Image: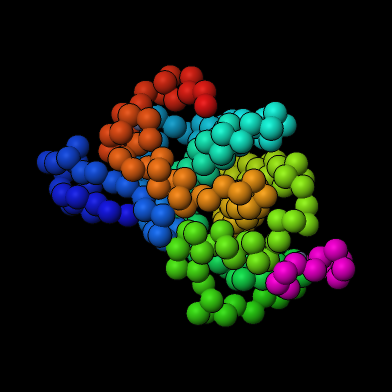
Amino acid sequence: MSVSKTDDLGSNPSAPAMAVFKFSKNDSFGRFQHLVGVVYSLPDDQLYSIYDLLAHQQRFAMRALKGIRKGDHEKLKINLLIAFSWLMAIANRFHIDVDDAVWQRFPMLCSYCSKKPCACKKVKPTSRRKLVIIKNARPPTLAGFQEMFVAIYPPGRRTLSDAGIHLAEEMGEVSEAVHNFLGQHRSGQLQSIKQEIADFVSCVFGIANSARINIAAELAKMFSHNCHVCHKAPCVCSFSKVARLRT
Ligand SMILES: [Zn+2]
Ligand SMILES: [Zn+2]
């Protein structure tokens, strides 16, 4: 992410409106999560409960699925990217490092059968295999994570519709994990949120790989100047404007 004036809004409170934050296609996953944090954490913390964040993540994910059903590539793309951004906001609320969560869950291997490419259909694992994490294989960029998912789950093996159904499934599991944690506040439940976020990310990449959407390149176009709607940092989009946003 390229940043002018200051890399940390907190370090220069007199000039936060001057900062320009953007994502570049070769940036890391962590940089994108950080961008969402610096642009949206202030309005997110002031205006949105965790339930509001989940509702928006789900709303845009559903609109992406409508794009699949209608064969509308543009609708799928924009809504998938927005749902992905709201997922970062949810992760930020819980201080979950998404790059790390995805790597722990998918270390260049399928998280169920521990193979690359996934051999779940052949092996039919009944429980998750222990994953051996090869340190140096971790993708340094968001684009690298997308390529990693091509290697683990080759997109030719399933339809775009099936990838969409899997996203809906994982979206429900993120919601379930959040609600479980908020009900009982056990640390294992926080760990589940981390894992479900990683699974949702794997499905975002799965759809992108099936639909030939380059997530990093598209995010770079979308986030070229702060918030993709109001172009301010922090974002000044009102609660009702966000609620009415249709893409
Ligand atoms: Zn597998
Ligand atoms: Zn905005």
Q: Residue at x 28, y 38 (%)?
A: 233
Q: Is residue 90 visible?
A: no
Q: Residue at x 56, y 66 (%)?
A: 103
Q: Please give left or right for residue 166 compared with residue 48 in the image.
A: right
Q: Please give left or right for residue 97 compared with residue 118 in the image.
A: left
Task: Provide residue 59's location: percent of width, then percent of height.
Answer: 59, 30
Task: Provide residue 65's location: percent of width, then percent of height.
Answer: 67, 35
Residue 178 quadrant = top right
Q: Residue at x 87, y 68 (%)?
A: 122
Residue 116 within the magenta-colored segment of the rendering: yes
Q: Please give left or right for residue 19 compared with residue 58 in the image.
A: left
User: Looking at the image, is 202 positioned above or below residue 178?
Assistant: below
Q: Nearer the viewer, residue 28 or 75?
A: 75
Figure quadrant, ligand 1: bottom right
Q: Nearer the viewer, residue 209 or 20?
A: 209
User: Looking at the image, is 216 positioned above or below residue 78?
Assistant: below
Residue 230 quadrant = top left
Q: Which residues, given as a range, are shown in magenta?
A: 115-128
Q: Main secondary structure of the magenta part?
A: loop
Task: Provide residue 109's location: percent of width, then percent of height.
Answer: 67, 71
Q: Please give left or right for residue 116 compared with residue 138 in the image.
A: right
